[in-house]
Image (cartoon, helix red, strand yellow):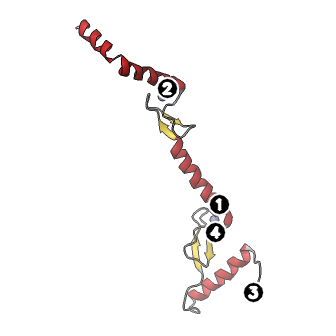
Amino acid sequence: MVRSETWEQRQQRLKKEYEEYLSGKWHYQYAFKITCSYCDNDFYASNRMQKYCCYRCTNEAYIKRRKERKALEKQKACVMCGKDFKAKKKDAIYCSNACKQKAYRQKSVTDYGFGKIAITEISNT
Ligand SMILES: [Zn+2]
Ligand SMILES: [Zn+2]
């Protein structure tokens, strides 16, 4: 038994086992031909659940997934103007300081100035 076989050596061994299985030499399948979910190259693995051909693809795919998830998390719609923006903080709800201030002012109007608005509306009609 080789103590540390290279990736190529392992691939050759598994390929041989896979081809032997196809030719009917083995009753059970020990090697599987899989298409890497990251680089789309065919490779051989002893585990049929394996998705990536090598450590690098596993790692790259993980980084890509994490990036995509992060981008999705950060992409938010401003509650004030409705524009999409990239949130620097997880709890950010406004695209800019301007919107934040606008919202703050609007909030103080609805909270404390409602009666005042109602009166002006009535006097206008
Ligand atoms: Zn790959
Ligand atoms: Zn905004």
Neighbour tally class for label 4: few under 14, some 14-19, many 20 plus, Cα within 10 Å: many
Q: Return the disc, 1 or 3, that comes first in the chain's sequence.
A: 3
User: In the rendered image of this protein, does residue 114 appear above or below residue 54?
Assistant: above
C-alpha span from label 3 to label 4 = 22 Å
| Along the line of sight, the residue nearer the viewer: 9 or 55 | 55
Instruction: Give the percent coordinates (x, y) of residue 32.
Output: 58, 79
118 left or right of 82? left
Q: Quadrant of residue 125?
A: top left
Residue at image location 77% in from the left, 81% down from the top: 3
- Residue pointed to by mark 2: 100
C-alpha span from label 2 to label 1 = 39 Å
Q: Return the disc, 1 or 4, that comes first in the chain's sequence.
A: 4
Instruction: Give the percent coordinates (x, y) of residue 121.
Output: 27, 11
Q: Return the disc, 3 or 4, that comes first in the chain's sequence.
A: 3
| Along the line of sight, the residue nearer the viewer: 67 or 57 | 67
Q: Which element is circle 4 on?
A: loop
Q: Nearer the viewer, mark 2 or mark 4?
A: 2
Q: Confirm or reject: label 2 Cβ below 8 Å from ligand 2.
A: no
Q: Which element is circle 1 on?
A: helix
Where residue 53 is drawn, which disc sits there? 4
C-alpha span from label 1 to label 4 = 11 Å
Q: Nearer the viewer, mark 1 or mark 4?
A: 1
Neighbour tally class for label 2: few under 14, some 14-19, many 20 plus, Cα within 10 Å: some
Q: Return the disc, 2 or 1, that comes first in the chain's sequence.
A: 1
Q: Confirm or reject: label 4 Cβ below 8 Å from ligand 1.
A: yes
- Mark 1 near mark 4, Cβ–Cβ under 8 Å? no
